[in-house]
Amino acid sequence: MIEAAAPEGKRHRRLIAAAAGVAALVPVYYLTDAAARFLRAGNAAFAPAPMGLACLAAVAVLVTLLTARPAAALCCGLPLAAAGVVFGLDLDTAMGAAGTLPWAREGGLPWSLPGGAPWAEPGEPPGTLAGTSGLYALIGVVLVLSALLPDRLRSMLKG
């Protein structure tokens, strides 16, 4: 009886990990773009960009957590890698798709300050800067490759 329950529990864990990977896609996408925007602003002002570093650190934490479970890493990494490929191959199509994303228009992100500037610059949907710079492709490929690693080389977070 216990042996029969083990595969069922494993299936549930994979399903939960896959759902976590899909759920992590939104914060990874928007935090990566926020980091790219803050770093661009710091570069333009020739000033430090601590918020860019903070956003990149948050993305690094999320990616590290996702690498603990292959299903989570694949469910987040494959769409990010695909977005990176589309940004690299056909910018017009990628920007058109990014313009349809939530928070691409007025109002900004849910955590934006009231009365603050919209998230996206006119003509620059969310994800454009991170996509054209290759950040989505890099993060996505890292996640997919981490899912392909054998268990003995997987993250210590797996437990």
Image (cartoon, helix red, strand yellow):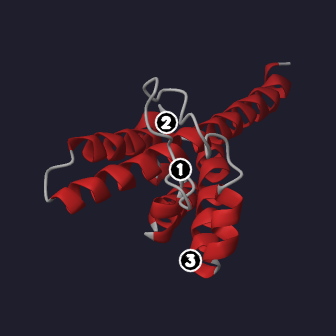
**What is the secondary structure assignment of the residue under circle 2?**
helix
* Nearer to the camera, 129 or 142: 129
Q: Earlier in the sequence, mark 1 or mark 2?
A: 1
Q: Which x, y percent locates residue 8?
A: 82, 29
Q: Is residue 17 above or below residue 123?
A: above
Q: Are marks 1 and 2 in contact (CB under 8 Å)?
A: yes
Residue 25 left/right relative to 49: right
Q: Which amino acid type is shown beneath numbered disc 2?
A: Lys
Q: Which x, y percent locates residue 32?
A: 44, 50
Q: Earlier in the sequence, mark 3 or mark 1?
A: 3
Residue 107 left/right relative to 50: right
Say which mark, if any, is on residue 151: 1
Q: Are marks 2 and 3 in contact (CB under 8 Å)?
A: no
Q: Which amino acid type is shown beneath numbered disc 3?
A: Gly
Say which mark, if any, is on residue 14: none
Q: Is residue 46 above or below residue 60?
A: below
Kindly identify which residue carries mark 2: 158
Q: Of tags 1 and 2, which is closer to the observer? A: 2
Which corner quadrant holds the N terminus? Answer: top right
Q: Is residue 21 above or below residue 43?
A: above
Q: Which amino acid type is shown beneath numbered disc 1?
A: Asp
User: How far apart are the two marked residues, 1 and 2, measured between alpha carbons?
Assistant: 9 Å
Residue 48 left/right relative to 91: left
In percent of the image, x 18 and y 57: which residue is there? 45
In percent of the image, x 63 and y 34: which residue is there? 20
In percent of the image, x 47 and y 49: which residue is there? 154
**What is the secondary structure assignment of the residue under circle 3?**
helix
Kindly identify which residue carries mark 3: 88
Give the crowd class for mark 2: few <14, some 14-19, many >=20 residues within 10 Å. Answer: few
